[in-house]
């Protein structure tokens, strides 16, 4: 938590210094962006790279890192997934915004899914390298282009499913109605 606060503070100082040193807005390939100071925790770059996460990625650490987590029917940070989907659907999300979903197998191994907005839409990176009980060839990182994310409410809970550009459905998350 301290590391995140320090990083956000440094980012704020850099933005303020850049804004003070130049009266012209930043230029990007797509649009002009005027520097602003946002006190809310940014989705962009708030997660560690998948390769930097420990092999034993506990649910406590995942929750602390801000992941959307489901372990044995208990969910946390689900509002981040809802906000991510809503921002994307309302075209308010920026390239680079992401949300991390961490699910756990019955044995307690982490399956990590990163949903990332890029210039073409949403990509899903599914990391199953920490699943010790799967076959070696099934332990990999796979990237998918996502065409749609659906949220289905039923009596027992809410399911989140991503549909790839090839028509394949990828289960993202389930939260109980408890």
Image (tube, grey):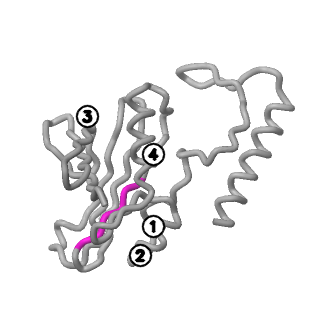
Disc with the residue nearer the chain's start (3 vs 2): 2
* Measured Cα–Cα span from mark 1 to mark 4: 15 Å
Between 110 and 140, the residue placed more toward the observer is: 110
According to the picture, the residue beneath numbered tag 2 turns out to be 58
According to the picture, the residue beneath numbered tag 4 turns out to be 98
According to the picture, the residue beneath numbered tag 1 turns out to be 62
According to the picture, the residue beneath numbered tag 3 turns out to be 148
Indicate the secondary structure of the residue bearing disc 2: loop
How busy is the neighbourhood of tag 3: few (under 14 within 10 Å), some, or many (20 plus)? some
How busy is the neighbourhood of tag 2: few (under 14 within 10 Å), some, or many (20 plus)? some
Q: Position of residue 93 (x, y in %)?
A: 48, 32
Disc with the residue nearer the chain's start (4 vs 2): 2
Indicate the secondary structure of the residue bearing disc 4: strand
* Measured Cα–Cα span from mark 4 to mark 3: 15 Å
Indicate the secondary structure of the residue bearing disc 1: helix
Q: Position of residue 81 (x, y in %)?
A: 40, 47
Marks 1/3 in contact by CB < 8 Å: the verdict is no
Indicate the secondary structure of the residue bearing disc 3: strand
Marks 1/2 in contact by CB < 8 Å: the verdict is yes
Disc with the residue nearer the chain's start (4 vs 3): 4
Q: Position of residue 132 (x, y in %)?
A: 24, 78
């Amino acid at each position: 938590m301290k590391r995140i606060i320090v990083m956000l503070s440094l980012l704020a100082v850099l933005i303020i210094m850049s804004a003070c040193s130049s009266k012209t807005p930043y230029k990007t390939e797509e649009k002009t962006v005027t520097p602003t100071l946002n006190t809310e925790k940014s989705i962009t770059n708030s997660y560690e790279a998948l390769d930097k996460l420990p092999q034993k990625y506990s649910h406590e650490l995942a929750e602390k890192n801000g992941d959307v987590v489901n372990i044995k029917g208990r969910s946390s940070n689900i509002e981040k997934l809802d906000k991510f989907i809503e921002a994307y659907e309302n075209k308010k999300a920026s390239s680079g915004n992401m949300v991390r979903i961490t699910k756990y197998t019955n044995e307690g191994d982490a399956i990590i899914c990163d949903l990332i907005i890029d210039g073409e839409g949403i990509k899903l990176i599914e990391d199953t390298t920490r699943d010790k009980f799967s076959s070696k060839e099934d332990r990999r990182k796979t990237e998918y282009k996502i065409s749609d994310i659906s949220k289905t409410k039923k009596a027992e809970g809410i399911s989140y499913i991503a549909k790839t550009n090839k028509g394949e459905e990828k289960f993202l998350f389930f939260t109980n109605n408890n």
